[in-house]
Image (spheres, rainbow, N blue to C red):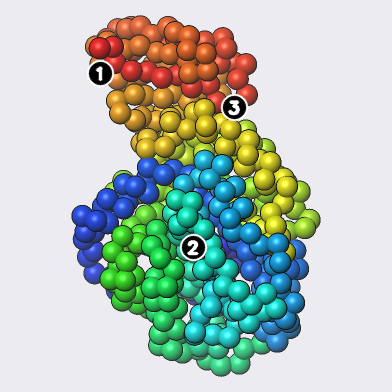
Amino acid sequence: MAIALCGIIGSVPAQNKYTPSASMIDARKQFQDMKFGLFIHWGVFSIPGDGEWVMNNRKLRIHEYAHLKDFYNPSAYNPKEWVAMAKAAGMKYITFVSRHHDGFSNWDTKQSDWKITNTPYGKDVLKMLAEECKAQGIKLCLYYSLLDWTREDYPWRTGRTGQHSGRTGKGDYASYFNFMKAQLTELLTDYGEIGTIWFDGHWDQTNPEGHTDLSSRIDWRYEELYSLIHQLQPRCMIGNNHHQTPFPGEDFQMFERDLPGENKSGLSYQKASDALPLETCETMNNSWGFNLGDKSYKSAPTVIRYLVGAAGRNANLLLNIGPMPNGDIQQEFKDTLQAVGNWMNQYGHTIYGSRGNVIAPQKWGVVTVKEKNYYLHLLNTDSITTIGLPFTDKKLKAVALKDGSKVELKRVQNKWQLTVPEAAREEKIDYIIEVSALK
């Protein structure tokens, strides 16, 4: 994921127009319908217990960091349990880090020796996960880093990160580009149907987020890279965590640690797309990769309210976990996901398959809509007694989903006005009211 560092102004990569196929448009719709996914940051970077940026942050050189491979043995890795946990939480897809910025490949790639099958563990963890996702009916998506802190051919001299790894070469992007193409071909050929390719690292070659010039210092050759992906798997959606307006060839827009329209992270200056599916990613504590010292765990109510906030803004939530180096998952994460799953079992129908932005997000909450039913998610009713609704239906009814009680809804000066029930003020998570047309 990204941090803000200094950079140099450069050139913008050329892009041509992209017209998605009918199959891709259908894939985008299915993606929007799923609404909730699990992000998994896991690799040799998990071993020090200091997050996925440990190599860069501790200024470790390649030959020092490489020792991690020699004692990486996640004997507790159980993809069946991972997928079952995600499914029980109400998640519909998993986005797995196939290769992070340290360049370590979590599959048996033929393009590098810096990979999981050259560790004492020796197994292809991605192959195992792909098989389990298929068996349990969960869509598999793959994160792939565009930048690399270990390869000499990556143009690291113009990058914002990875400056202390001990590299001496000048970089050779033509060579590095061919390496990425070969790896992506493996991923999209040998591991079944892949829902999305989730690129990260473009920002390594730009000025910091918020700068007036975010052009790249290198030509990433996205047109060729994106075309390859769409040719290999026509329904595979492409997203790029560049923190900018989507580039041609991309199929969804992501927001890092922000709901669309917000910029609390300092990374999300871009406007939310009206044309593409949206996804926001967030952590369950403050770290992406396993971090021994990070005890800032988000509660289940906090996660649920964030998921609801995303859906009300027409976005998916990709919720992250950082498994431990042995392959097990922290109990705090398991407990929270189970609690979220319990809530989704009861109220998930107001989230799955819904669309947001029916009404712009309000202080009191958000609205989702599905099959002509409007769901008012009341998240903050401290100072609200009535809510005005811009619906044009002549006859409407309102029901509280918690107990099925009727909610007062009447016409006031040709507009609908809903009276907030007293019970809503006692609700700590999300008081949901279904508004639908009377038949």
Determine which of the numbered discs, if any, sits on residue 429 in the image: 3
Mark 1 vs mark 2: give the one in front.
Answer: 2
Q: Are marks 1 and 2 in contact (CB under 8 Å)?
A: no
The reply, left or right, for residue 417 in relation to residue 259 is left
Residue in view at x 52 percent, y 41 percent? 90
Residue to which mark 2 is pinned: 130
Mark 3 or mark 1: name the one nearer the start of the chain.
1
Residue topped by disc 1: 392
Q: Nearer the viewer, residue 382 or 84?
A: 84
The CA distance from mark 2 to mark 3 is 34 Å
Q: Quadrant of the C terminus?
A: top left
The percent position of residue 12, horizontal first and vertical second, equals 35, 72
Q: Residue at x 40, y 65 (%)?
A: 192
Residue 327 vertical position relative to residue 399 in the rendered view, above or below: below
Q: Is residue 424 left or right of residue 223?
A: right
Sequence-first tag of 1 and 2: 2
- The amino acid beneath tag 1 is Thr
